[in-house]
Image (spheres, rainbow, N blue to C red):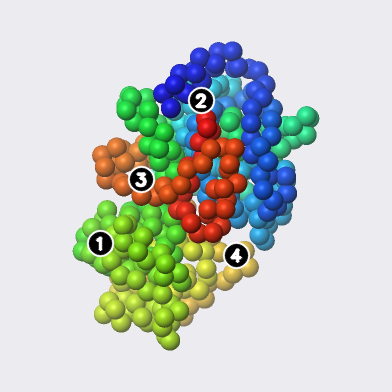
Amino acid sequence: MASTVGQVMRRMASTAGQVIRCKAAVAWEAGKPLVIEEVEVAPPQAMEVRLKILFTSLCHTDVYFWEAKGQTPLFPRIFGHEAGAIVESVGDGVTDLKPGDHVLPVFTGECKECRHCKSEESNMCDLLRINTDRGVMLNDGKSRFSIRGQPIYHFVGTSTFSEYTVVHAGCAAKIIRLLLLTKFVSSAVGFLQVGLKQQFNCSCLGATLNVAKPKKGSSVAIFGLGAVGLAAAEGARISGASRIIGVDLNSKRFEEAKKFGVTEFVNPKDHDKPVHEVIAEMTNGGVDRSVECTGSISAMVSAFECVHDGWGVAVLVGVPNKDDAFKTHPMNILNERTLKGTFFGNYKPRSDLPSVVEKYMNKELELEKFITHEVPFSEINKAFEYMLSGASLRCIIRMDA
């Protein structure tokens, strides 16, 4: 990676202000394999930055919108939103980023000017919060990607499945310490691991650490043991929870989950009673905290109803279908159970991501175990196969391979 960084920095002066031709994985149709194409990437406009993507990864969010389930298809499109990158050039008005900076592209930005950004209680930027329906840049309503004059849509403002991409400056979190740690920067896996935190580790690690806030010695139930749920379990482990109960319909996930601190397991299919009753019996009335990571409305209700009355807190992370409705008896709330939601783990992306990097650097986070596969960019469709088959937690996609 060190040689890649050096090569990129030497090219920056010659490419700034120019259209860059590079490779990108384009989704031409919903559910069809991505096609490696030569695309043109326009220079950044005001308050935008153009990034050289070093490594990226596939997330369930990419797959969901690639399949266009329950959504209005927006194709052709370049997906991807987990990556490690270097700033290649900046547009007018950008003052806190410069060419050569190491950044993490983030799908939810931080303008630092709106009421949400100025509030200590919110991380949802009015200007730059995630928008899956917008495939163009805010500045002029146009795409920065094209193929022979045909616009190619962006995805959640990041589009990291391209060797170069353009993002709003508020959607690039600068990671200063990376510039100071030669050993860390030279580690391809290490750099991407930081990038991966912005999605499943920030959303779910933060859901546990920042929202559920389990106390040392407490009990925590995690609903869903995919990559998202395992990050939530990691948060419970870091918090010092003494019992971490994993709930999943696939018992094959249980052994792997032990590596993330999960101590007990429940497969709802193995019981003839509701899962919240099973957990209540296991814990003398319910767990202290629960984190729901599946998006299943029944799992959401169970996660809420399985927490102990008087002090139990349930946190919802999974995204439900648009027509779903959450239903529970009002007495479950009157009996002092608390239901919370979270977005991006309550982290302000530009302000707080460096502190998450510090946790990794200080060995408080064990990220290596999340990465199970690695493929070159030319074989990006294998990453889809791994995820759809359930074979991987996260798969590194090397842009230089």
User: Which tag, 2 or 1, sits closer to the chain's start?
Assistant: 2
Q: Residue at x 62, y 64 (%)?
A: 322
User: Which tag, 1 or 3, sits closer to the chain's start?
Assistant: 1
Assess whether mark 3 and mark 1 are in contact (beta carbons under 8 angstroms).
Answer: no
Q: CA distance from mark 1 to mark 3?
A: 21 Å
Q: Residue at x 64, y 27 (%)?
A: 22
Disc assigned to residue 195: none
Which numbered disc, 1 or 3, marks the residue closer to the eye? Answer: 3
Tell me the kind of residue under disc 1. Answer: Ala
Q: CA distance from mark 3 to mark 4?
A: 32 Å
Assess whether mark 4 and mark 2 are in contact (beta carbons under 8 angstroms).
Answer: no
Most extreme residue toward the right, as rendered? 149
- In the image, residue 236 above or below residue 137: below
Q: Is residue 332 visible?
A: no
Crowd rating for badge 3 (residues with CA inside 10 Å; few <14, some 14–19, many 20+): few
**Label 2 SS:** strand
Q: Quadrant of the N terminus?
A: top left
Residue tagged by mark 2? Answer: 87
Tell me the kind of residue under disc 3. Answer: Glu
- 234 or 334, which lies in front? 234
Tell me the kind of residue under disc 4. Answer: Asn
User: Which tag, 2 or 3, sits closer to the chain's start?
Assistant: 2
Tell me the kind of residue under disc 2. Answer: Val
